[in-house]
Amino acid sequence: MFVPDFVCIVQVSHSICMGYHVTGFINSVIFLLTIGGLWAQLRIVWQRGHDQRQGRLTEGTTAVLSLNQFVSSYLAFFSFFLYGACLERFNHYLVWTRLAASLLTLMVLWEIMRSRREWISKLSFTLCSVLLFLLPGVLLQNAGAAVWCRSISQAMIVVATVILAQGYLHQILLIRHSGRTGAVSIRMHQFFLLKDISTVVFALAMGLRTGWPLLLLSSVSGLTKLGTLWQFRWARVSPQAQDRRLATQEAVPVVPDFAP
């Protein structure tokens, strides 16, 4: 009886391991769409900057983009990057994809800071830069830091979940208030939704003991993406959105993003 039981255990372990790698690989491939979505968002901002310099755009290049939302997205990406690096089994599927997303999101924050020149955008970009370039080195400078590094990253993920939820709510409220989507990229949010769905599946394959942070944040994130995507349709077909576009255009003076 011992040999069959041992073989059964080995087969189950092999199946779990294969499920982990298959879902991890799929999640990484789909996450490339998220990276593509962030790149698409940057290209929209850069194109709007070009149009503004040519006199074809009368509003800011980052109009309607929520600084709150991008800071919360950055915290989510960075938290998973740190969590994957601190696990007993270094999670390559999490670490490298989330590092790339963190860098691109940081570039979006740079564009927001450069265009708006407000103290809050400068502070946000500075703090996010410090987190990325200093905190991992401090936490991982010795092997004994791995345990409390995981605890810190798990706490950051829970906090990031709350911040992410209110960040996307803020983005939705900006669209509802102005009646337009402005510089917000629908492609980015579509790719983010696919990423969230695949991450939920990956979290289940990891097991609840280590995968619960991914499951928590990705579930909340997916729901907020659905809410944001609905606003694109509302802004396109709702008479109320048209009235609000007219009202905000009349009430708010145009202030260029870039100094002449």
Image (spheres, rainbow, N blue to C red):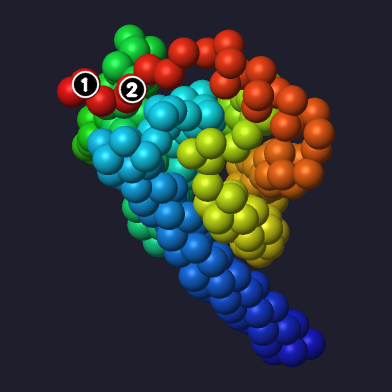
Residue located at (31% from left, 36% from top): 55
Name above or below for residue 258 compared with residue 222: above
Residue 259 circle label = 1
In the image, 190 versus 196, the foreground residue is 190
Name above or below for residue 62 compared with residue 30: above
| Count of labels in the image | 2
Residue 256 circle label = 2
Residue 91 lies, in percent from the top left, at 44, 58
Crowd band around label 2 with a 10 angstrom C-alpha radius: few (<14), some (14–19), many (20+): some
- Quadrant in which the C terminus is drawn: top left
Where residue 225 sits, quadrant-wise, is top right
Residue located at (53% from left, 40% from top): 184
**Label 1's element?**
loop
Residue located at (78% from left, 44% from top): 237
Question: Viewed as shown, does residue 173 lie left or right of 84?
Answer: right
In the image, 56 versus 48, the foreground residue is 56
Name above or below for residue 40 compared with residue 129: below
